[in-house]
Image (cartoon, helix red, strand yellow):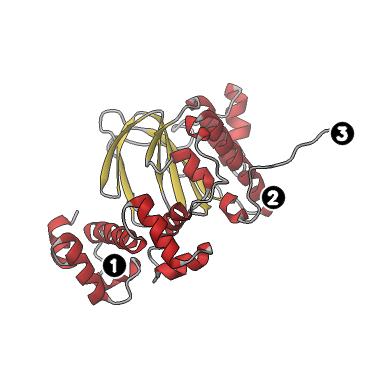
Amino acid sequence: MIGNRDLVLDRTAPAYFALQLNHCGISACRAGYTYGFLMRPYHLVHFILKGTGTLWTKNQQYKLHAGQAFYIPAGSGGKYQASPENPWEYGWIGFYADAKSPLLEQLFCQRTVISISMSLQELEQLLLSIIAVSDHRLCKMDFAKTGALCYQESDYPGEQFSAITDFSQSMEAGSRLYHLFSRLLETQESAASPSIRNCNPAADAKAYLSACYSEPLKIKDVAVALHVHPNYLSTVFKKEYGQSPAAYLRAVRMEHSAMLLGISDSPVAAVANAVGYQNPFQFSSAFKKQFGVSPSVYRKQHKT
């Protein structure tokens, strides 16, 4: 007899370990090419294969280069720009996953940018293998020419997305997505982070609030979801992060509302609703308390 037994996955919370591909691609950007968006329902990871560029997200700026990856969580926005002198080529994966997924925690350790230990050649091959599920030109043309999957902008000019149209393709693309992340975890030093089986209600609550800030949440709702008493949750959260869950939720909402005001023309009431405030007057009061000015004045000062 031979076999094995999985002692890692927690079967009481299988959703934490589920990944679902939304889209995957590789692009060689022209000098100065800029792309930005507000909020997406899926997580987004970019892998820089060549060149340099700049990322702006969560009111932070990052200068990036080949061999790094950056992560934009679901519910967040961002903007990034290829360097005018040495424009980057990057691959990306958009995927759905639970906000408390141990994959995201182990790979990024609550950071926005990490350095990739895997060889960029292997990383590119794994990205192309996902794309090849629906774009058979990769297998037919590139493998025949080079003996390996490869991407050349001259061979695939412009935007050429191929759709995954049946369940078997979806399953195959999903399996290759899992393989890519398994190799990333295997090669990253962060794979040696603390056991994912450890129970940490404060961290769980933080992930819950970060993912669901746009909902009309109350702390007792979070406590119910985590099967703990609200008073206990508040105590452990404040001990872990130095502030109450309510204060953290308010800070997350203010951060996102400030970004929305700066990069969109949406009415203040719409911004309030997008960050979980059903009453725009309550939102304006909280915003002024946080930033010292009203949302409309803040927009005039920071509009980009």
Place of residue 289 in the rendered image (x, y in percent of width and height, measured from the top left): 18, 65
Place of residue 231 in the rendered image (x, y in percent of width and height, measured from the top left): 42, 66
Marks 1, 2: nearer the viewer: 1
Tell me the crowding category of disc 2: few under 14, some 14 to 19, or many 20 or more residues within 10 angstroms, Cα based. Answer: few
Label 3 residue SS: loop
Looking at the rendered structure, the kind of residue marked 2 is: Ser
Q: Do the residues labelled 1 and 2 touch (CB within 8 Å)?
A: no
Residue sitting at 58 percent across and 46 percent down?
Answer: 197
Disc with the residue nearer the chain's start (1 vs 2): 2
Quadrant where the N terminus lies?
top right
Looking at the rendered structure, the kind of residue marked 3 is: Met
Residue behind mark 3: 1
The span from disc 2 to disc 3 (Cα, nearest Å) is: 32 Å
Q: Nearer the viewer, residue 265 or 105?
A: 105
Residue behind mark 2: 168
Marks 2, 3: nearer the viewer: 3
Residue sitting at 38 percent across and 63 percent down?
Answer: 213
Label 2 residue SS: helix
| 66 with respect to 133 (left or right) | left
Q: Which of 79 and 279 is in front in this view?
A: 279
Place of residue 122 in the rendered image (x, y in percent of width and height, measured from the top left): 54, 27
Looking at the rendered structure, the kind of residue marked 1 is: Val
Q: Which quadrant would residue 83 be assigned to in this image? A: top left
Residue behind mark 1: 271
